[in-house]
Amino acid sequence: MGFEIIDIETQSVDLLLATEESHVVDLKAIEIAPGKLTRSLSAFADAEGGELFIGIDEDKDSGKRFWRGFESIEAANGHVQALDATFPLGQFVDYQFLRCEGAAQKGLVLKVSVLKTPDVRPSSDGTIYVRRGAQNLPVSGEALQRLEYQKGVRSFETHPVDAPVQFVSDSLTVTQFVMEVVPNIDAVEPWLNKQLLVRDGKPTVAALLLFADEPQVALPKQSAVKVYRYATTDAEGSRTNLQGQPVTIEGSAYDVIKEAVDTAVATVQGIRLLGSTGFEAISYPRVTLHEIITNAVLHRDYSIADDIHVRIFDNRVEVESPGGLPAHLTPENILDERFARNGNVVRWISKFPDPPNKDVGEGLNTAFDAMRKLKLKPPVVQNKQNSVLVTIRHERLASPEEVITDYLQTHDEISNIIVRQLTGIGSENQVKRIFQKMIKAGALESIPGRSFAKSAYRLPGAKDSTEDESNPQLRFDE
């Protein structure tokens, strides 16, 4: 088995030695027992992936680290064999040897890059670990079950719920569905059993979500969407800028998606922000809100007792759904890879008349494309520990510098708050840095004679509208 040797510079060595162990980095000396190394591989694979470096010493007293690698690739055979037995080369793992010609850097450091896996991976002794901070923590029992739900190895949608079957079989939702989609069946309950939507005489989570008129009665805090309106561009909403009461949307998954999208669109359309021609209505593509909310409802982890939260701010919409990204999905590959955590829900809702999904896995791609067509920046997907947060910003693809310059073509001056309103940038200090950069480049100048509170900027050589040589009283004093 051949391994690549990568030559790195001394500066890269210094950066590695200064790296803190974390959720995605682990550093080990070459004396580490090969079997123990597989704990880190298991932990990384069962979390978000990471990098393991073997050949880094640490002085316990000073905390200082040293490069001390293997004398040769052959000297690392025991470690490589143990790692390869658990994670064969090419299956979500990559091995490289790092070399530096500096006198202080002796030997080869083995770098193991581990990707998040679609399944649960044990260490060589059969124990399953997850990475939390700089620790490899063993999981079993309920914690293992939670990991399997998170990974999508098992789905909570097949879990039977202690509720009468009639809650589903006698609902108006299933009656209408059967009449329009499967009109030849004689009775609903045998059909539900045949489709494995009833188990042990009880409706499954999927059956309730799809066909109960009010799934929330049997699945409280697990099947609703809450919509909030915050009149702010702050990083987080608060009670002081919450407009009215949050709207709670309940019903079958089909109805929840439709009403949540309608509510979000109507709320967004009521927002007006300053544009180049005055106050303008905010405009997000409806299809973007539709696809992201649909994705949240269909692919959330229903084992977590929490609602989906749609937060509408002045400059963005946030859609947060319970459960991290399943299987091998990451924010980086989510537009290219496919995985359905709730296969039954996805399959059956696509059979409804005018379904919210097309069951082809292109929803998020459609959402991103719609934003680009409006020359808005694409949504940002963040994989949190227990949820997925998608942020849809009303932020132009044009750079802030271009927005400022374009605005000043038809206006005498521009201020920090106007730039934040035009660009969707939430940080006042970030805009200050943009102004400073443009002034240094000669593309902008500060208007003299303004107090700090009234500070503004203009194109070089332009005249301040408040400056009038014949009437000095119109000037602002310091």
Image (spheres, helix red, strand yellow):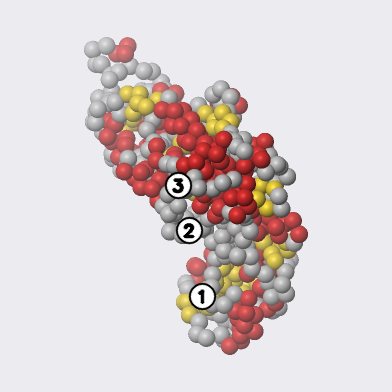
Q: Name the residue under label 3.
A: 357
Looking at the rendered image, the quarter that the C terminus falls into is top left
Q: Position of residue 127 (x, y in %)?
A: 72, 69
The residue at 67%/36% (across/down) is 217
Picture layout, residue 322 above or below residue 126: above
The structure residue drawn at horizontal position 30% and vertical position 40%, both measured from the top left corner, is 402
* Mark with earlier residue (3, 2): 2
Give the distance between the C-alpha atoms of the residues marked 3 and 2, in whole angstroms.
14 Å
Q: Where is residue 83 in the image (x, y as percent from the top left)?
A: 62, 77
Identity, as a three-letter code, of the amino acid under mark 3? Asn
Q: Looking at the image, is mark 3 or mark 1 earlier in the sequence?
A: 1
Instruction: Kindly report which numbered mark, 1 or 2, lies closer to the viewer in this rendering.
Output: 2
Name the residue rendered at 27%, 34% in the picture. Answer: 406
Residue 110 falls in image quadrant: bottom right
**Residue that label 2 marks:** 338
| Residue 90: image tag | 1
